[in-house]
Image: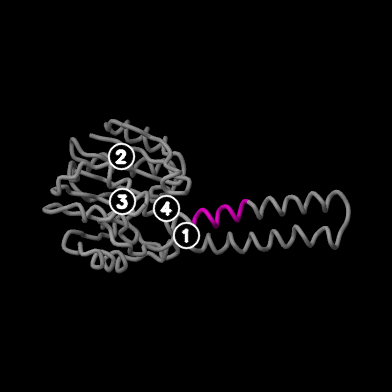
Amino acid sequence: MQAPYMKRITYGYDEPKLIRNAAIAYVLANAAAFLIPYFWEGRFFTYTSYFALFIGWVTSNIAVSLFIYGRWGKYRMRDYMMSVIPWTGAEQVLDVGTGQGLLMNAAAKKLTTGKAVGIEIWDASVSDNSREKALHNAELEGVADKVEVINMDARHLTFADNTFDVVLSLFSIRYIGNAAEREKACYEIARVLKPGGTALIADHFPVGSYAVALAKAGLKVESSRHYIWTSFSLTWMAVATK
């Protein structure tokens, strides 16, 4: 359910090309499943038809899941993440992989004297993201004076140690290279987090490796579990404090 403090501004769909391709694959797979037995007979073609049905089922689930997440789930997950932080209004917040500013702007809504910084290396293939859209959404949300948007790699943060009270990331770390590079990003998140600060790192697959990296970097991992029924998608989140 959408939180009352947040206007319903559209932040796009994650991986729209994947949604489109999965939908096309679903149609083609189902067409093949029904046409193969019509034109050919035999055990091989029967099993091929069953396999095509299975592919159709898989691709339909991918398309529907990503659509539901983009339409409703991401906003529910955003609101839940905001509810975890005991806001005072003075926090310095970092949103790693801000995209169109979903978490950055939500955090800025909670601030009075604080500031929310969103970093990203924008990729137009992912929800048609851009720095301009993040800034435009901040204006629509009425928080443009409380945010800063920077093109920056999470593996090489230029901020000083102990800069942020809160670090947030939603479905972004997974786009970073390999496991070692994602671990490096977790180390950087731990480095810039202030003592007493909280990091919330959510992703589309189990975040156990993130939790391990955060713990190795000196943070206390308070939880690492799934939030599938919150986001209507495969979602896990690690909560860690310094």
The picture quadrant where one finds residue 229 is top left
Q: Nearer the viewer, mark 4 or mark 1?
A: 4
Q: Residue 57: image x %, image y %?
A: 64, 52
* 217 with respect to 14 (left or right): left
Residue span colored magenta: 58-66
Which callout, 4 or 1, points at the residue further toward the start of the chain? 1
Amino acid type at mark 3: Val
Q: Residue 46: image x %, image y %?
A: 82, 51
Residue at mark 2: 187
Spatial CA distance of label 3 from label 2 is 13 Å
Label 2 environment density (alpha carbons within 10 Å; few <14, some 14–19, many ≥20): many
Which callout, 3 or 2, points at the residue further toward the start of the chain? 3
* 4 with respect to 209 (left or right): left
Q: Are marks 3 and 2 in contact (CB under 8 Å)?
A: no
Which numbered marker is on residue 15?
Answer: 1
Residue at mark 4: 73
Which callout, 4 or 3, points at the residue further toward the start of the chain? 4
Amino acid type at mark 1: Glu
Q: Secondary structure at mark 3?
A: strand
